[in-house]
Image: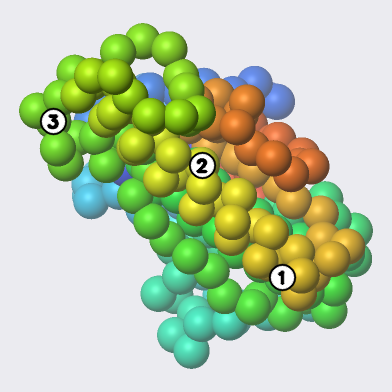
Amino acid sequence: LIFLDIGNTNTKWRFKSRSFAIPTQKFEFDKLPNSPRIYVSNVSQRVFDTPNNLVTHVESQKSYKSLINAYHKPKSLGSDRWLAMIASYEFSQGKSFIMVDIGSAITIDAVDKYGSHLGGLIFPGLEKIRQGFNFHTVPTGKNIAGVGESTEEAWTIGTLSIIVNTINQKIKELETKLPKASIFITGGGYSDLQEFIDFKHDYRENLVLDGLEFYANNVG
């Protein structure tokens, strides 16, 4: 089986327990090895010609086991968020959990110990914020302490602080509602923020792929 996560920026897949990645703009299905079945989450704007008899397109659903989607229109929840929640649900083993995905967009979703999805947040990732105001060169090095002594430093500290402080603040807020929650983080932007995250967490490199695998094994 192949598990395929097509994101806005990158596409990842897992085949025989090995994971691969390529920019989404360069991905085509003919790059995949032969497989009797492909499970796909696609949140990108690209439309692909697919071998329909082999492909299962996974969308968000109202429920998975005792995990209940909070959205009134379940399919309007991004499939990547739903699958990352499925993986977190399985890994948390009956505990409440908070799932943070740090990508081109950052999402945070909270689920109580009964499996009820309390809802979530979406906001731009670090690169998207910086691309929106691309008139400043961002110097190397990472820092959120103090203030900048040049426009470039001020921009670097300011934009990084927005992301870091929002994540830390929201997790602290959610932990008051879910004090025993397991916190899972995934996404390619994690390495940029790792040293500034001030709460205990479990980093999982490919939660969406994990979720696709759980889905295939339990739903089919």
Q: Quick check: 153 above or below 69?
A: above
Q: Secondary structure at mark 3?
A: loop
Residue 123 seen anywhere in this rendered image of the structure = yes
Residue 111: give x, y in percent of width and height. Answer: 71, 70
For the image shown, how many numbered marks are present on the structure? 3
- Calculate the distance from the C-alpha at mark 2 to the C-alpha at mark 1: 22 Å
The residue lying at 59 percent from left, 60 percent from top is 170
Q: Are marks 3 and 1 in contact (CB under 8 Å)?
A: no
Q: How is the image coloured?
A: rainbow
Residue 217 in view in this figure: no
How far apart are the two marked residues, 2 and 3, measured between alpha carbons? 20 Å
Q: Amino acid at mark 2?
A: Val
Nearer to the camera, 215 or 130? 130
Between the residue at mark 3 and the residue at mark 1, the CA separation in whole angstroms equals 36 Å
Residue 64 appears left or right of 82: right
Residue holding disc 2: 164
Snapshot quadrant of residue 119: bottom right
Q: Quadrant of the C terminus?
A: bottom right
